[in-house]
Amino acid sequence: MQVRTRIQSRNRFSDTMETFYNNGSDDTFLQAKWNLLLDTIGDDPEFLYVWALTTWVNGFFWLFGGLFVLMDIFNRPRWLRKYKTQPGTNEPLEWTGLLRVMRTILFNQTVIGIPLTYIGFHTAGKLNLPNVRILPSKFEVARDLVVCLFFAEIGFYYVHRFLHLRPLYRFVHKIHHEWTAPFAWTAMYCHPMEHVISNMVPPIIGIHLMKSHLATAALWFSLLIINTVRDHCGYHLPFFPSPEYHDYHHAKFTECFGTFGYLDWLHGTDKQFRKSKQHLRHRFLWSTKSARELVPDK
């Protein structure tokens, strides 16, 4: 009797843990919301992976980046001006430059991005896709994100260094570097060739390798947008990751080619940065004091 009780207890515990870790269960909150979404927009793979995902990624970029752009246009709120990484720049942001950036981004997202996404889906992307109706487990999401991060960092670093070689820099990458003091939307302001080999290819490698679920892909691209907008936004805000590293790259051009700095450290492409004021300011701000207040210019 005791043995039977212990077995039943162990089975109940196992079932509980399976339910907790299995996001694919119809009984979970997220799964129910996911089903409701797919019931509304449909579950055709081509529509979801090409059109819905593209709309989500591009829309999120414009909306999230737009929060910072509005601050640059109107110089409001005033109390946030002290968090500018390069004070006096884009204060206010000029309309001619802003419109040029917007036109280039829209071209890259539509004329370049949509056809390539469509072709990619119909050549390799649609093979062995997971059931879009069943959400992945927490473990699967975390695993895929780690793989995506690994390949995106490697791909971005080496492609970025490649783009700084002549004549590629002169004819391709120099467009992105027109802004020595970047603002949020310049994250995607670049030559079409750069948009393909730097903005599109490295981030998608992990998704294709792991045959990631649509929800994982949407989460991954959202995190990418948050990160790249943060890198270019021109504000080092409290309780928000520092943009000083990539901001230094735009100001100096010759160092800090990666996103997180590991490959720059490995290849020695951050030596001058480590001697700079920006390196001392490259920290998470745990109070309302700005990085320049903590590390003054003089």
Image (cartoon, grey):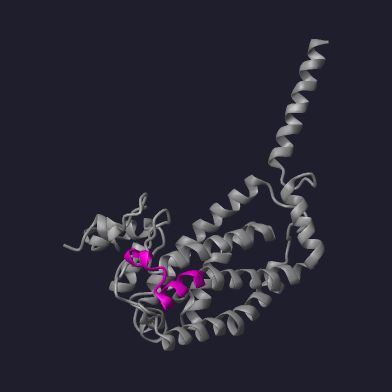
Q: Does residue 81 lie above or below 118 as drawn?
A: above
Give me the residue at 33% from left, 69% from top: 249
Q: Position of residue 247 (x, y in %)?
A: 34, 68
Left or right, residue 13 beside residue 247: right
Query: In the orientation shown, which residue stands out farthest toward the bottom?
Result: 96
* Front one among 60 and 9: 60
Residue 222 occupies which quadrant of the picture?
bottom right
Left or right, residue 134 beside residue 82: right
**In the image, which residues are magenta?**
65-83
Q: Does residue 204 lie above or below 91 as drawn?
A: above
141 is within the stretch colored magenta:
no
Quadrant of the snapshot with the C terminus: bottom left
Q: How many marks?
A: 0
Q: Is residue 253 visible?
A: no
Q: Is residue 196 visible?
A: yes
Q: Position of residue 84 (x, y in %)?
A: 34, 67
Quadrant of the snapshot with the N terminus: top right
Give me the residue at 68% from left, 67% from top: 125
Residue 215 occupies which quadrant of the picture?
bottom right
Magenta span main SS: helix
Give me the residue at 80% from left, 16% from top: 5
Q: Position of residue 282 (x, y in %)?
A: 32, 57
